[in-house]
Amino acid sequence: MNPVIYEQIMSLLGLIALWAFWYYLWKPQRVDAFRQKLFALRSDLFDLAANGVVPFDHPAYAHLRLLINGMIQFAHRASFPSLVVAIAQSANAPFNPMAAWKKNVQELPEGERSQLLAVHDALSDAFAKHLIGGSIILSLYVGLRVLYAVAKAFFLLLIGKRDLRIFTVSHARSKVDRETNHVAKAGADRIEAHVLYEEERKAGLRRQPAYAR
Amino acid sequence: MKEMEYKLQSQKWDMGLRLGLALIKYGFLYLCIWRLAPAMEAFAGKTTLANFGVFLYADLKANTVFSHVVMGILGLGGASYGLRERSQKRKEIRRLGNRVVEIEKRWDPNRTSSGLTVDGRSRPEDEP
């Protein structure tokens, strides 16, 4: 038996094993973990309403719950290509349901508003991390941005414009989080708007034009 | 009218996206099998499974046998542990899910659902 053919067979079998691992073990596991985070957030939101922070029938509550439900339902389809499609589509969107939601949130008193916004921020953070962790391109891009920020910080340190005290693990971690949010949040907003639009339509909260019924 | 156009366009993009992702997924597998087939044919009839085993054995030289065995145990063990954990979690979701729904509906009769199956999986119609 030719050793080259043997090597080829072993490499290809390895690639097929990697393919099965990625699609049938790794991806479903990531989706389950993301869904678990979203269920916890939905539970937090429910507790806010049950404790009287916001009424169950307030649009700010109802629409945020719809958004979380939509994210749970379509968590398995959140990917870099879907982000690109959502950005491309957003230019033609007839309206932005997220802007309407933010307007509804503004009607709430300060304390209640910040609690609801905290749930939404946690949702966006979880989504941004899920999106970046599942894409090699986005992970590389974030990695490059972090490297650039580190190189810049070192340069500023060398010319005496930065203090050595900022070079801590927590500072580095917050920098990575900031870069992650910066990269994914702009796109995540578009996906959120699209998901909320679809969920509102399904729940019958959006009036369908007569010709579309 | 703009809303209808947007809806139609969304459906078109969505279909394109599903098709593209399915092409990447199955295209890669097809490519591997397509490359694997001639390699298998190359020794079909000329090489027995025992011969292949000899090569495999020669590959697992004394210094690499241990690492192969450890990697195999870790890989298979990890995968089966993950699958077992997942099935346990789904059982728990099924057990507790209905209770949560019941309690939440008492507070909020207009409660909206995530649209997953009772054990927390995507519905088949939502699959890509």
Image: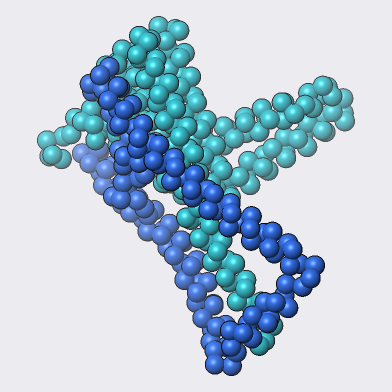
Chain colours: A cyan, B blue
Closer-to-camera residue (B1/A16): A16
Question: Does residue A74 appear in this view?
Answer: no
Closer-to-camera residue (B27/B14): B27
**Residue situated furthest bottom in the rendering:** B46
Identify the residue at image location x=62%, y=71%. A11
In the rendered view, tell whether residue A190 sits above or below residue A44.
Answer: below
Q: Position of residue B2 (x, y in %)?
A: 25, 38
Q: In this view, does A87 lie to the left or right of A133?
A: left
Q: Position of residue B84 (x, y in %)?
A: 48, 48
In the rendered view, tell whether residue A199 sits above or below residue A119.
Answer: below
Q: In this view, does A199 lie to the left or right of A176?
A: left
Q: Is residue A179 left or right of residue B83?
A: right
Which quadrant of the structure image shows residue B40?
A: bottom right
Which quadrant of the structure image shows residue B52?
A: bottom right
Identify the residue at image location x=55%, y=53%. B79
Question: Does residue B34 appear in this view?
Answer: yes
Identify the residue at image location x=35%, y=35%. B95
Identify the residue at image location x=48%, y=56%. A23
Which quadrant of the structure image shows residue A119?
A: top left
Quadrant of the rendering where the N terminus of chain B is positioned: top left
Closer-to-camera residue (B121/A143): B121
Q: Position of residue A176 (x, y in %)?
A: 66, 33
Q: Where is residue A146 in the image (x, y as percent from the top left)?
A: 69, 37
Closer-to-camera residue (A185/A170): A170
Mark count = 0
In the rendered view, tell whether residue A65 sits above or below residue A130.
Answer: above
